[in-house]
Amino acid sequence: MTPTIVLPVMIGGLYAAGVYLLLDRSLTRVLLGFVLLGNATNLLLLSTGGPAGLAPILGYSDPEQFNDPLPQALILTAIVITFGVSAFVLAIIHRSWRLARNEAVGTDEEDRRVAARKAPDADELDPDDLAPEDRAAMHADSRAGVLEDLADDVDLPAGSGAR
């Protein structure tokens, strides 16, 4: 059997279309892109199995002519994973539509604020030099008064101390 160029081109086209759709803000297109990626992966795994052979359970041929069951098991696993993630993304789309009547992901203003900051090197970063709103949670300045509220001292009635 001579190899053809059709299957690799088809796999490459499905991967390209799937990645293109995944990069969109519309969750429906993200779902379609993920399904295309799953199908491209299934075709890729199918092509790694080699030429078709006979089923080992029939017992009509030599063991060298049997089908390789590993790609079939991997394809079955990929189908289940694609179905599960597709159901999850579909639930997110439904929830987004019910809440906001829009299924496109908006721009987060907090992400823009973080992206606009000058990115210091990790070695140069000192939390005391940052502005108070940019400091990490539970920094020494933000914990003022918190530790006193978390004290575990309990007022015990007189005479109930440890003996």
Image (tube, rainbow, N blue to C red):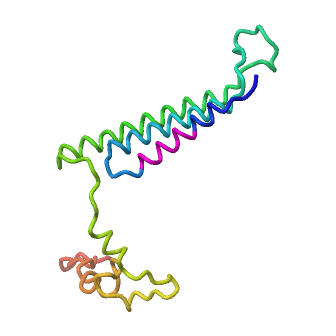
On the rendered structure, is 67 left or right of 83?
right
The residue positioned 61% from the left and 29% from the top of the image is: 73
Nearer to us in this view, 142 or 159: 142
Please tell me whether residue 146 belongs to the stretch shown in magenta.
no
On the rendered structure, is 83 left or right of 16?
left
Picture layout, residue 31 above or below residue 2: below
In the rendered view of the protein, which quadrant contains the C terminus? bottom left
Nearer to us in this view, 74 or 142: 74
Residue 54, image x, y percentages = 71, 14
Please tell me whether residue 20 belongs to the stretch shown in magenta.
yes
In the rendered view of the protein, which quadrant contains the N terminus? top right
Residue 152, image x, y percentages = 28, 76
On the rendered structure, is 23 left or right of 146?
right
Residue 106, image x, y percentages = 27, 58
Residue 7, image x, y percentages = 62, 31
In which image quadrant can residue 28 be found? top left
The residue positioned 71% from the left and 25% from the top of the image is: 68
Nearer to us in this view, 160 or 144: 144
On the rendered structure, is 89 left or right of 123?
left
Looking at the image, the residue that sits furthest to the bottom is: 129
Q: Main secondary structure of the magenta part?
A: helix
In which image quadrant can residue 156 be found? bottom left
How many numbered dots are placed on residues in this image? 0
Magenta residues, start to end: 12-22
The residue positioned 32% from the left and 81% from the top of the image is: 134
The residue positioned 55% from the left and 29% from the top of the image is: 76
